[in-house]
Amino acid sequence: MTQFLIRRTFWALFLFIAASMVTYILFFIIPSDPAALSAGKASTPAIVNHIRMELGLNLPIYQQYWDFVWNIVRHGNFGRSFVNGTPVRTFLEHEIPVTASIVFGGVIVYLAIAIPTGIISALRPRSIMDRLGMVFVLIGISAPSVWVGIMLLYLVGFRLGWTPINGYCSLQSSHQLGTCGGFWPWMSHLILPWITLAVGSAALYTRLIRANVMETMSEDYVRTARAKGASPQRVLVQHVLRNSMLQVVTILGMDLGLLLGGVVFIEIVFSLPGLGQQILLAYGRFDLPVIVGITMFACLAVIVFNFLVDVLYAWLDPRIRLS
Amino acid sequence: MSELLVVEDLQKYFPVTRGLVFQKAIAQVKAVDGVSFTVEAGQTLGVVGESGCGKSTMARCIARLLEPTGGKIIFDGRDITHLGNQDMRMIRREMMMVFQDPYASLNARKRVGAIIAEPLEVHDIGSAADRKRRVQELLEIVGLNPEHYNRFPHEFSGGQRQRIGIARALSINPKLIICDEPVSALDVSVQAQILNLLKDLQRDFDLTYVFIAHDLNVVRHVSDRVMVMYLGRPVETGSSKELYAAPKHPYSGALLSAVPIADPKLGRAREQIVLEGDVPSPINPPAACRFHPRCPRFVDGKCNVDEPVMTRAPGASDHEYACHFPLEHWPMGEGELRRAGAVAQEPAPAASFD
Amino acid sequence: MALLEVQDLHTRFRTEDGMVKAVSGVSFELDRGETLGVVGESGSGKSVTFLTVMGLVDPRQAEMAGSVRFDDKEILGLTTHGLKGIRGKRIGMIFQDPMTSLNPVKRIGWQLEEAVLIHNDVPRKEARRRALEVLEEVEIPKADTRMDDYAHQFSGGMRQRVMIAMALINQPELLIADEPTTALDVTTQAQILRLIGKLQKDHGMAVVMITHDLGVVAELANDVIVMYGGRIVEDAKVDDLFEKPEMPYTWGLLGSLPRVDVDVERLEQIPGQPPSLLRPPPGCAFNPRCAYVFDRCRTELPELRAAEGKDDHHFRCHLDGADRARIWTQKAAAIARGESAA
């Protein structure tokens, strides 16, 4: 198992370096002049040149890349935005919690829906519950999250007035004017985004869990457990769930990684200042440092979560753990 | 009679690797470790053994589906051990394989006619019309309805699918067919059909078979000669009549004894030899005689020190075995087997005094 | 009174294509301590019969009818709750493939303890002690360390021993073994069969041995039933069955066996393949493949009737006694001479 872990760690590290390299180099392939962008519209060639030197753009690529990496690793410095000079790091510090709140909260909501629904559907195939569940799944997969988000916003937020319709409140109570904070404000701003996220994903996970549970139920060792006289509850909990959840965990991990890169639609519909919204803005303005910073974070999230999933899987399955 | 297939000291090792980044071999799985035999044209060699004995690996080496690690394979007088792909193409027209699982060895997405015609296509034999005619001919030869060449494999039963596999093997008129457990996955009543079919085809088309199976009854029925394998090596080879009537190696005896007899009175009358322990792994085979840890005739100091070599049985010209204490007669019960081993024990050496 | 009495058992599966009649009217009895061999090929209904007996068939997918009496108590149709104390305690069952029949992510010791704890209100320590005891009984070396291993760390033969241990841990009166050695090597098979025989003697259990291998049945069984197309087509004491089988399918089975002790030039083959249980042939299920078929066979299902002079030997065939005797005598002689019995 330790061998496995060491190998996976090296691999994760290697992947991250490769991803960062590719990201960085891509921006050199895109035809643009960061210096000119940074300088703004009303600038002279002299200013542009000056900025070019300041940004180190006249250095060879590998030198720039190395400086870039060194800055991150040593100083935690991701550069500054071309648009307003704010350190990219500030953006990250403010936006990661927002996106994380959306994603983790949403995941908990949709798992809370998908797991019971999936299991019940699997236990009673072709029953009314199952068929209703599958209809719900179909709707969930088909409905675009933008539409769901806007509908919820309109119906629940605007018409019924049950929740605020935009903005984000941090978890900590705030004492500054113009910002909000505290647990309930935080939650009330996020409930609709969570539901929106959940609708699409719950559907997928319900289907996945249903399929996995049904497959596990037909395994020989489940039959053996029944032959031993185990009650249906015991069979379900002790034998079926543990084995059928393995695959769900894997996919969940991958999803988490991807989602943390920015749940763009949701952030835009609900005006939540997260990574997705930010990177969209940055694309529009060709704000390279911001783009690169957020992309790197997204890569990191994916790699880390995949790594965690691998480790968890290996730990849960003794066939891998003991090899 | 010419020798169609000669195998000399065939070896196939699979490396067991370890390592973080660079995988290096720390051990070898010696799946096939020194197998030699000959097969005369028109005859059937049965290869029998349990899991881990290497018989399937050996079959794949002969068909060059795997690269041998060592040894020689001489087919029809030609050394094919390390022939390149181009040259092997010609050889492959003469050597075909039939596999165990009739459900997995046929491409479920292809029609049966296409499956049977594939070898013809690969070797560019005949026109499309010729091939179709040949496919229908083959379907009839193996006992299927020639009209069914447009059906898919899942529309046939297990036994029928195995017939399709055989038709495919026959399509290009090979000289040698290697059958790797062709009836193991079939029902008993269907097994007999396929075994009879294989025998008929051998007679009608002058085929040579290497027939691999774990079922001793089946092997006896189709084979002229039988080779018993254990952990990558042959332990006994001989004509099927002789080997089954009077096995010389204790493992052959144990194998024969383990087969349940479909006759309750005979079954009760005999004393079965039941070996202890499991078939060991080919990664670390026991020293000297590989069978010694489980052998009822084991003699300490001899069997675990000196490796037995293949010896000719007295009288019989082609019955060979590799054992220091071969069975004197057959049948022999377990008790008698053990006693013979004890008798052969050398007296303990005199104690030495310092 | 018999330990297990099955009367007119029917099991039909509801599928998209229609009703699959897996078991159609099976009746037999099993006394305490006896071994019943159940022989059949794929589609014969041999496994489904005993899955039904154990209540392991899902009533949502299948219709079951008839009577199954265990120790004079009706158990057909009972739920897991109703079968408490019987399934896993008084009746144990082992299956064909020990690799897939053991939970891959739970330790063997845990699975054995579970078998005890389901039925006995004892502390875990006691369950563990029992587990150790039974592992030693099935001859697993170093049982105390191996208890903490997982299924994949055992060889095929060892896994099957673990399965047997799990079925025996509560001292059942009946052990149902569904093709327990089919997936094993021949020498391992001999070990397992010998073990089952020994355990049976030690515990006085009744055993049902389901198999397609007539040799296994010849070695272990007292009584044999032969199943075909969801029905019993012959039942007899084991010596009788092999000495004088009374119907063409059994003749075919015996004649088509390649033998180790006799050289047969050409095996008798039964043409065709086992029947569809979705649309079984009318009349006798064996009629499309039978060499002795005549008109009546195609329309009328033969009843199970006693052989002449032997009321413990039954068979299903329309042929009359004289014909059957003659045909079998010829076949038996041919087999003895090493010729084809066809």
Image (tube, coloured by chain):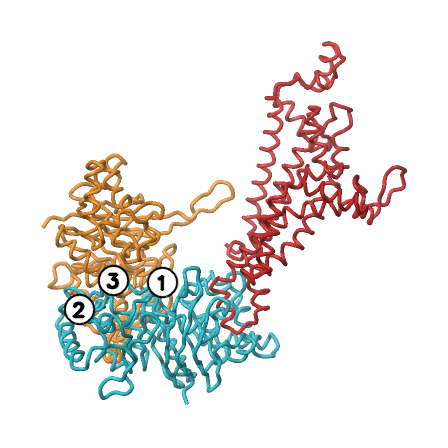
Chain colours: A red, B orange, C cyan
Residue drawn 61% across the image and 23% down it: A62
Residue A131 on image: x %, y %: 57, 57
Q: Give the CA distance from mark 2 to mark 1.
A: 25 Å
Tell which subunit mark 3 falls on: C
- Specify whether C270 is left or right of B305: left
User: Can residue B12 be spotted in the picture?
Assistant: yes
Tell which subunit mark 1 falls on: B
Residue drawn 25% across the image and 62% down it: C272
Pick whichever, B351 or A97, lies toward us. Answer: A97
Q: Nearer the viewer, mark 1 or mark 3?
A: 3
- Specify whether B174 is left or right of C161: left
**Amino acid at circle 2:** Ala
Pick whichever, A208 or B331, lies toward us. Answer: A208
Q: Give the CA distance from mark 3 to mark 2.
A: 34 Å
Tell which subunit mark 2 falls on: B
**Amino acid at circle 3:** Gly
Q: Which mark is residue B245?
A: 2
SS for callout 3: loop
Residue at numbered disc 1: B279
Q: Which mark is residue B28?
A: none
Q: In which quadrant of the rendered image does the C terminus of chain C lie?
A: bottom left
Q: In which quadrant of the rendered image does the N terminus of chain C lie?
A: bottom left
SS for callout 2: helix
**Amino acid at circle 1:** Val
Residue A116 on image: x %, y %: 63, 59
Q: Which mark is residue C272?
A: 3
The answer to which of marks 2 and 1 sits earlier in the sequence is 2
User: Can residue C135 be spotted in the picture?
Assistant: no
Q: Nearer the viewer, mark 3 or mark 2?
A: 3
| Labels 3 and 2 in the same subunit | no
Residue C12 on image: x %, y %: 42, 69
- Specify whether A131 is left or right of A172: left
